[in-house]
Image (cartoon, helix red, strand yellow):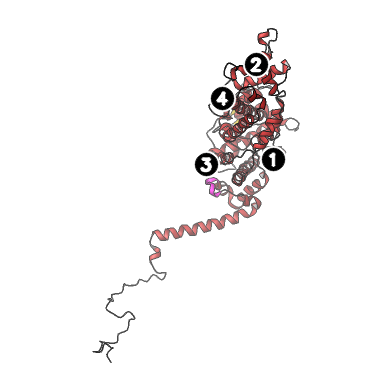
Amino acid sequence: MSNEPNTNNPGEDPQDQFQEMLRRLMGGAAPEGFDVQEFAKASGLPNDPQVLANMFQQVQAMLSSTSDGPVNWKLAHDTARNVAAQSSDPTPSSVQQREVDQVLRLADMWLNKVTDLPEPNIIGKAWSRAEWVEATMPTWRRLTEPVANSIAKALTDAMTQNLPEELTMQGLGGMMGGAGSMLQNMGGAIFAMQLGQAIGSLSTEVVGSTEIGVPLADLEMSLLPANVAAFGEGLEIPAEDVRIYLGVREAAHARLFTSVPWLRGYVLGAIEDYARGIHIDVSRIQDLAQDVDPSNPESLQAALQEGVFMPERTPAQQAALDKLETALALIEGWVDEVTTEALEGVLSTAPALRETVRRRRATGGPAEHAFSSLVGLELRPRRLREAAALWAALKEERGMEGRDAVWKHPDLIPTTEDLNDPQGFGARRQLAEASDAEVDDAIEKLLSGGFDKPADGSSKEPSDKTGDEPVDGSDDGPAGEDGKPGA
């Protein structure tokens, strides 16, 4: 069935369709004297029927489904799936499934020799881009919902405040209830479409379920064969080597997140802390509502991608962002280090692939840039090299078990200061551990009553003197008749 609008029937003319849509949005019937064409003209809408038809299709897509909240998440999901399917996205074949499974099994075997963390009980999978979208969408919603709600509301408010004066002169005062509902749907739908666009674009770039350092799909270990193949293009490295290297990285990520139960919540919590403190630059929203050309829907998309909605960071947000960037660097640094150790003497192309991945993670791809512009958050480990050096130094000082023991509790993990001086982390940690040991000894001594005994081990008997004796301890004999002490 064709998607082109039918312009042969006057009743199906694009302009008639648009006018009918406006009537429905205004409550089903226009007030006396209301002219829909004048309404469109006052709103800056074009007279070109084909342009109106294109606009109508986009608006219809935005408003066709309802949402319980400010953001239309179904629309975000559908948009992401559509973007993922724009290029070839076949379901992985049985051969690809077997190749991925074998690579991830080998990866676990090699990693067993270089890390003390246990092997995860996870079956490796080969995913299409659409399957990646489906598996990660719940986490994307969790991470972006606070900022999405704020931006959708700000956009709706700006659109409402910037309605032309001519509309009020058309007698719309009693009909703004319906128009307000329309604008609310529009604000949430616009952001949902952009978010879906960013997630769908990411699905064409990521090579696994954990590539961006965030566990988007809980308890999963997967590779995307189509993206793995695209990653290797132009590298002059055998495709099998590329698959092996990326498979070991994916397996290392999965092992870390499954073996360290607090880590996933720690990372996602840092993102949520950042998002909860979001502050929208309302003036930029208003500028967007005034300047975007309604006859060119792509202008809105371009404005969003340029960071028109970039939020202003508060000190609390900056602290959350520093925490997140440090955590991502530590995760990526550990994965980088154990992957290198696991493939030493096994894969001759590993050093070249390591450098390629490092550069890719440091700079990010186009989709990552679009996502960061949309929500004001970059999910990139800026200090990957420093973190890898820190993990290498820890292993040299403490061995494999001592290095991996740092993941036992969030209070033990290195800080930003430690990334500044990776070689000094061990010495600082020893001082902290010595201090903790002294505190533990003092607590144990207190609980056992050790502080009640003198240091020399002697004990003092309580005094049996009574209150009848002089306070100063003197013994001058009985008093005389005059009350003076006797001679």
| Residue located 65% across and 16% down the image | 19
Placement of the C terminus among the 4 image quadrants? bottom left
Residue 382 x, y percent position in the rendering: 67, 43
Structural crowding at the residue carrying mark 2, measured as other residues with C-alpha within 10 Å and reported as few (<14), some (14–19) or many (≥20): some
- In this rendering, position of residue 33 left or right of residue 470: right
Residue at the far top: name it: 9
Q: Which residue is mark 3?
A: 262
User: Residue at 64% of width from left, 46% of height from top?
Assistant: 387
Check disc 4 and give the amino acid type. Answer: Gly
- By secondary structure, the bulk of the magenta-drawn segment is best described as helix
* Residue beneath the point at 63% across and 15% down: 20
Taking depth in this image into account, of 58 and 44 the one nearest to the observer is: 44
Residue 438 to residue 357: above or below: below
Which of disc 1 and disc 4 is earlier in sequence? 4
Is residue 3 something that shows in the picture? no
Magenta extent = 407-413
Residue that badge 1 annotates? 362
Cα separation, mark 4 vs mark 1, equals: 48 Å
Q: Nearer the viewer, mark 3 or mark 4?
A: 4
Mark sitting earlier along the chain (1/3): 3
Dot 3: few (<14), some (14–19), or many (≥20) neighbours within 10 Å? some
Please tell me whether mark 3 sits on a helix, a strand or a loop.
Answer: loop
Question: What's the distance in space between the residues labelled 3 and 4, CA to CA?
Answer: 47 Å
**Image disc number at residue 19:** 2
